[in-house]
Image: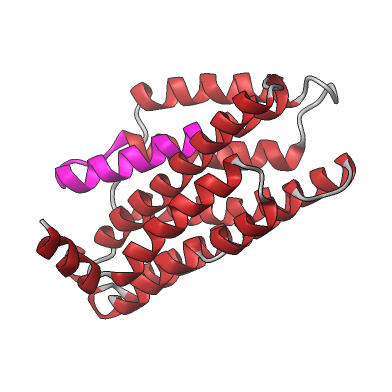
Amino acid sequence: MLSRLNQAVRARPERAAYVALAAATTVTGALENHRWQAFVKTPLVPMLQVGLLRRAGAAQPAGLAALLVATTGAAVGDWFMLESGRAADAGEQRRLLRIGASAFGVQQAGYIALLARAGYRPTRRTVLPVAAGLAGLAVLDSAETRQPDPIVTAYGLLLGTMTAFATGGRPGARGMRHRISAGGAAFFASDATIMIREHLLHGRRTRAVAEAFVLVSYTAAQAALVDGLEQTIARESR
């Protein structure tokens, strides 16, 4: 087993680094250690990009470019979300959160385009629960301001669309489909938990558990989606 692990690390050292950073991000986030969390979370998505670039020769150039743009949106979004968590007042926190949501919107739009290009399509079975979840989150977000934030709402629609595409699947490619489906569902669960935590959870221990879930599901989702989408842009997938 150790020899297999060593071989896996040598073959994909950036993935081993990603797993270590994801674990550290989860721990520092649950402990509310914002300085160390920024240190370990900022390179998370770039580490996935390192893997994409190492295997660039096996990918279709246009698809690789789209995936790199999408993941860059995620990296920028992570940075602004971290800054929003350290903001001194609610107004500044909301401003940074909206910028972060806009950057993540670039990621979701890129993922949607790649999924559609690969033949993934939403189905009634996947659209209905996503729509119900988004409606509930919109009610939560508008509880204090009486109206939903337009930028956060637009991001939510992109997130829901990506989730519906990812979980809708594509004929054939069974293993890849399951990875992408799991990634889409985990991403939706992560972002939904952020909203629930901010509006409904108040105890420190409860919020820490919620934050740990947010980060575990987010880091797992990014890795699963990037891995799955990388397979859809492989040269032999033409």
Quarter of the view holding residue 122: top left
Magenta stretch: residue 156 in it? no
Q: Is residue 146 visible?
A: yes
Q: Percent from the top left, x then y, of residue 71?
A: 49, 62
* Span highlighted in magenta in the image: 168-190
User: Position of 150 compared to 72: left or right?
Assistant: right
Quarter of the view holding residue 164: top left
Quarter of the view holding residue 18: bottom left
Q: Is residue 121 visible?
A: no
Quarter holding the C terminus is: bottom left
Magenta stretch: residue 184 in it? yes
**Residue at 68%, 52% in the rendered image:** 34
User: Position of 11 compared to 79: left or right?
Assistant: left
Q: Percent from the top left, x then y, of residue 58?
A: 23, 75
**Residue at 29%, 53% in the rendered image:** 228
211 lies above or below 74: above
**Residue at 10%, 56% in the rendered image:** 1
195 lies above or below 146: below
Q: Nearer the viewer, residue 167 or 97?
A: 97
Q: Nearer the viewer, residue 161 or 20?
A: 20
Q: Nearer the viewer, residue 139 or 23?
A: 23
Q: Percent from the top left, x then y, of residue 36?
A: 62, 58
- Most prominent secondary structure in the magenta stretch? helix
